[in-house]
Each structure stands twice: as C-alpha cells, then as structure tokens.
Amino acid sequence: MENLKEIEGLRNGDYKTFESMFTTWYKPLYLYAYSIIRDQENAEDIVQKMFCKLWDQSPKIEIHTSLKSYLYRIVHNDCLNWIKRRDTLAEHHQYLSYAGEKSTNSTESQLMLRDLEKQVETAIESLPPRCREVFKLSRFEHLSYLEISQKLNITPNTVETQIVKALRLLRTALKDFLMVLVWLLVDK
C-alpha cells in the first residue's frame, strides 16, 4: 500500500508527518470540496475539520486504501452531508417564508419576532464566555475554525468543540422556538 510511512507516522502521533500531509493535501482537497459545494468558506471548513478529525483519531486510524483515496472519500462524504444540511435548511426557510407571507402585516407576528430575537440574544449571552466568544466569531464574523484558532491562540479542535457545545446549549435553551430560529438564522 502506498503512503505506508505517512500512515504509520500519523498513527504514532508524529506531528511533522501530519504537517507534511496537511501541506501536501490541503489545497487539492479544498479545490475538490469547492468543486462539489461551490462555497469557498464552507469548503475550507470541511477540509479543516477533516484534518482536525484525522489528527484526533490518528492513533486508531485504519486506512485500507491509498492515503489519497482515503482523504478524498472523507471530504466527498463531508461535502454530501453539508449539501443535505443546506438543502434541509433551505426547505425550512421556504416553508417559513411561505407561512410568513400569510401574516406579514400581523402585529402579533412582529411581536413574536421581537420576542424571539430577545430570546436568542439572551441565550447567546448566557453561554460560557469562551464558548460565546468562539460562537460569535464563527456565526457573526464568519471566521473559519482555523482563523478563530489563530485569533484566540487555541487549537481548531477546541474551536470545533466550543461550537458544538454552543449549538447544543442554544438548542436546549431555544427548543420551543427552533423552527422560527432556523428561519431567522437562514434569513439573515
């Protein structure tokens, strides 16, 4: 099997091997992801997350094909998952837009929207400080995980962990408003 040396180095936690793999494969994998999803920022995020997972799971990694095939397959699957999530959000947005058209001028709808915005702001502000900071940089300043990690001097994996934590806490805090929240986040 080709790349056996790199795979063994990765399994043994050799950072130089990982860094070399990142340098060699980041750009081609990014271009591949971009060719599938046609979204620069999300293509970057997909490839960065893939490398974070690869590093985190390196001791137990099992590659039965070439390294190239393995990396491209992961990126391909992650792109397909991203497309499914995007399409699901688009469906919800379309439904909520249609439902919203029926009550556009409704005072009650406007009050509900303001109430929801206050609930979202309160929920975001109630996040733990580091979690809130990472979430805001990601969602409101549109920074990639790598950019956030460099700005805050933390690992991309920590960024991902904080985003997952923030989304879990927000989902719990806003569970009664989830459908309206999806519409709000997609609409902005």
Image (spheres, rainbow, N blue to C red):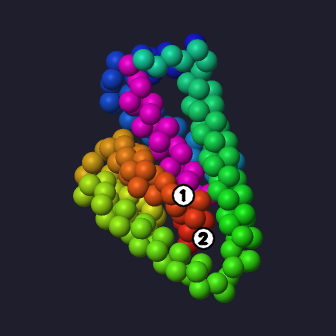
In the image, residue 19 lies in the stretch drawn in magenta: no
Q: Is residue 69 above or below residue 38?
A: above
Label 1 neighbour load within 10 Å: few <14, some 14-19, many 20+: some
User: Which residue bears the numbered disc 1?
Assistant: 178
Q: In this orientation, which residue lies closer to the viewer: 128 or 13?
A: 128
The quarter of the image holding the N terminus is: top right
Q: Is residue 8 above or below residue 116?
A: above
In the image, residue 44 lies in the stretch drawn in magenta: yes
Query: Which residue type carries mark 1?
Result: Leu
User: Which residue bears the numbered disc 2?
Assistant: 187
Is residue 150 at all visible to an observer of this figure? no
Q: Residue at x 51, y 57 (%)?
A: 176
Label 2 sits on a secondary structure element that is: helix
> Where is residue 139 shown, x and y percent of the image?
45, 62
Query: Which residue type carries mark 2?
Result: Asp
Q: Quadrant of residue 151?
A: bottom left
In the picture, measured across the screen, residue 124 lies left or right of residue 68, that is left
Count the numbered circles shown.
Answer: 2
> Where is residue 58 shown, x and y percent of the image?
41, 24
Residue range corresponding to the magenta coloring: 37-59
In the picture, measured across the screen, residue 7 lies left or right of residue 186, that is left
Q: Main structural element of the magenta stretch: helix, strand or loop? A: helix
Q: Is residue 130 above or below residue 33?
A: below
> Where is residue 172 shown, x and y percent of the image?
43, 50
